[in-house]
Image: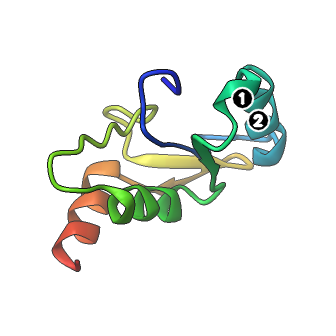
């Protein structure tokens, strides 16, 4: 996704019992050196979505990947309500 994107925001998605920083470090390890500067790392998913929305210019496309139909974020065995559609709608309504 980094190769074909202007900017990529890496974030967490259901870390369960893993440390989100470890997951993000694994994601970064899979990127090429040429990709540096094309991505941001924002562990908090809500903040990551907000940042993507704020960086977007007219005509840009924001792809929110990972959650799909899920309406929760699972952290340390607890499912917290989190719906990407609700979050992005709230952010755009407040811009």
Classify residue 41 as left or right of residue 61.
right
| Residue at (84% x, 39% y) in the render | 22
Local crowd size for mark 1, using a 10 Å CA cut-off: few (<14), some (14–19), many (≥20): few
Callout 2 crowding tier (Cα within 10 Å): few <14, some 14–19, many ≥20 = some
What residue is disc 1 on?
Answer: 27
Q: Is residue 54 left or right of residue 40?
A: left
Is 46 drawn above or below residue 70 in the view shown?
below
Q: Position of residue 12 (x, y in %)?
A: 62, 45
Q: Could you tell me which residue is drawn at 53 percent across and 49 percent down?
A: 73
| CA gap, disc 1 and disc 2 | 6 Å
Q: Position of residue 77 (x, y in %)?
A: 70, 46
- By what rule are the colours in the image chosen? rainbow
Residue lying at the far front of the rendered structure: 34
Residue sitting at x 53%, y 27%: 2
Q: Are marks 1 and 2 in contact (CB under 8 Å)?
A: yes
Name the quadrant containing residue 92. Answer: bottom left
Q: Position of residue 88 (x, y in %)?
A: 28, 58
Pick the residue in front: 23 or 9. 9
Residue with the mark numbered 2: 23
Secondary structure of residue under mark 1: helix
Q: Is residue 6 above or below residue 30?
A: below
Kindly state the secondary structure of the residue where label 2 is placed. helix
Q: To which quarter of the image does residue 68 belong? A: top left
Determine whether, in the image, residue 48 is placed left or right of residue 17.
left
Q: Is 77 in front, or is 92?
A: 92
Furthest residue toward bottom: 94
């Amino acid at each position: 996704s980094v190769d074909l994107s202007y900017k990529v925001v890496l974030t967490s998605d259901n870390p369960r019992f893993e440390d989100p920083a470890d997951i993000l470090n694994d994601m970064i390890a899979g990127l090429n050196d040429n990709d540096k500067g094309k991505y941001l790392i924002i562990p908090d998913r809500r903040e990551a979505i907000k940042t993507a929305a704020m960086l977007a210019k007219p005509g840009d496309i924001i792809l929110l990947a990972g959650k799909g139909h899920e309406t929760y974020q699972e952290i340390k065995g607890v499912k917290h309500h989190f719906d990407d559609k609700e979050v992005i709608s709230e952010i755009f309504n407040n811009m």
